[in-house]
Amino acid sequence: MVLGPPKSRAGLRTVAIPDAIIPDLVAHLTKYTKQGPDALVFTGIKGGPLRRSGFNKITRWKYAVELLGVPGLHFHDLRHTGNTLAADMGVSLKNLMARMGHDNERAALRYQQRSSRADRQIADGLNALVEADRKPDEDDDDGPAGALVPVA
């Protein structure tokens, strides 16, 4: 195993995390990591880098995801989920790319999934536009400027 820089320049970044997970992260760092700026956040049994081949065994991943009711969930699926949730919040592709450490749109789009929640948000947004257009504008004496026009 060779530890080194990320695959791309975009991979070297600072990522904000939700305040809600900070207590759990601090507890993990206190219990499992060494002191110092170069300390590894996640380590193998002997304190070295956590190898992909030992991840499931060390973390008891299969057991954990079964308890959560999502058997078959892979660790990397969490990246897809997080980025899909961010996209559903209306985050721009450029901001998603920065957060994910991607330097091209194609790589970033791979992590976005179509969701019914996003579809509902689009429909609700369009509905708000239609409803706003239907309300009489008290200050407008010139007619329905900017009115939505049906297209056949």
Image (cartoon, helix red, strand yellow):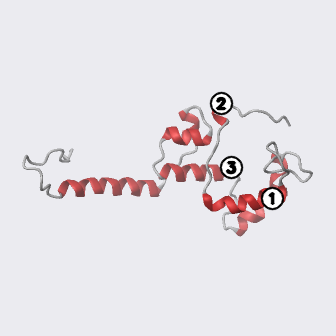
Image quarter for residue 11?
A: top right
> Helix, strand or loop at disc 2?
helix
Q: Which residue is labeled 1 in the image?
A: 30
Q: Is residue 49 left or right of residue 125?
A: right
Kindly report which numbered mark, 3 or 2, lies closer to the viewer in this rendering. Answer: 2
Q: Position of residue 17 (x, y in %)?
A: 62, 52
First in sequence: mark 1 vs mark 3: 1
Q: Residue at x 59, y 53 (%)?
A: 81
Q: Position of residue 22 (x, y in %)?
A: 67, 59
Q: Is residue 131 left or right of residue 52?
A: left
Q: Which residue is labeled 2 in the image?
A: 9
> Helix, strand or loop at disc 1?
helix
Q: Which residue type does callout 3 highlight?
A: His
Q: Which residue type does callout 2 highlight?
A: Arg
Tag 1 and tag 2, C-beta contact below 8 Å: no
Q: Which mark is residue 76?
A: 3
Q: Position of residue 120 (x, y in %)?
A: 40, 58
For mark 2, does the 10 Å Cα neighbourhood hold few (<14), some (14 to 19), or many (20 or more) residues? few
Q: Residue at x 60, y 56 (%)?
A: 18
Q: Is residue 112 left or right of residue 140?
A: right
The quarter of the picture where the C terminus appears is: top left
Q: Nearer the viewer, residue 17 or 67?
A: 17
The quarter of the picture where the N terminus appears is: top right
Furthest-right residue in view? 46
For mark 1, does the 10 Å Cα neighbourhood hold few (<14), some (14 to 19), or many (20 or more) residues? few
